[in-house]
Structure formats: structure tokens, C-alpha cells
Amino acid sequence: MARKCKMEKMKKLPKFKVRWRNRCPLCGRARGFLRKFNMCRICFRKLALSGQIPGVRKASW
């Protein structure tokens, strides 16, 4: 419930710019956010392993 409330609050612009918080649009997570892909690390890993993010593959060396 708390995450759903935060997602609703995120939709309107904050009074001050420094209050803006990047959140994952898929799950609402605020921590571990990857700006380049606009999602959290958990959702990124799930989508990358299933092959839904083009140009991303698991590293092995």
C-alpha cells in the first residue's frame, strides 16, 4: 500500500526540484535505480535475462 501511495504522489510535480526521486515505473522501487534504462536493478536483471532489453547480455570472461 505504501508503495502504491508513493507512485501516486510521484505523478504530480514536487514543490521544489530537489525533492524529485527517481522511481522504477514497473515496480515503484526508489533505490538501485539505473538512469540509462529508467528502471530498478531488479527489474533490469529480470528483463535482461529474458532478452527483452536490446543490446544487453550477461557478461562472461
Image (spheres, helix red, strand yellow):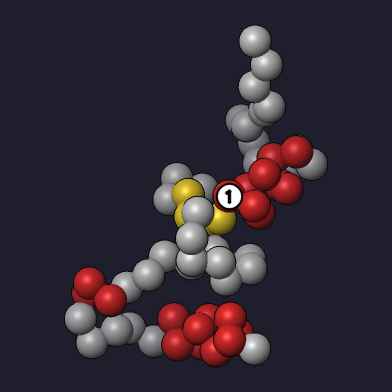
Picture quarter containing residue 2? bottom right
- Identity of the amino acid at label 1? Arg
Q: Is residue 29 above or below residue 5?
A: above
Q: Is residue 21 left or right of residue 25?
A: left
* Residue 51 shown left or right of residue 38 in the figure: right
Quadrant occupied by the C terminus: top right
Tell me the residue at 53%/81% (across/down): 7
Q: Position of residue 33 (x, y in %)?
A: 48, 55
The one nearer the camera, 28 or 53, is 28
Residue located farthest toward the right when viewing the structure as drawn: 50
In the rendered view, would you say 7 is above or below 50?
below
Q: Is residue 38 visible?
A: no
Left or right: 45 in relation to 50:
left
Q: Residue furthest top?
A: 61
Image coordinates for residue 52, horizontal then vertical, percent: 72, 44
- Give the percent coordinates (x, y) of residue 46: 73, 48
Q: Residue at x 50, y 83 (%)?
A: 6
Residue in the image at 49% along x and 66% along y: 30
Question: Label 1: how many residues lie within 10 Å, few (<14), some (14-19) or many (20+)?
Answer: some
Numbered disc 1: secondary structure: helix
- Residue for badge 1: 41
Q: Taking the image as drawn, is residue 55 in sight?
A: yes
Q: Is residue 60 above or below residue 50?
A: above
From the viewer's side, name the closer residue of 6 and 35.
6
Numbered disc total: 1
Specify the quadrant that holds the N terminus. bottom right
Relative to 2, say whether 55 is above or below.
Answer: above
Query: Horizontal and vertical percent for residue 38?
Result: 50, 55
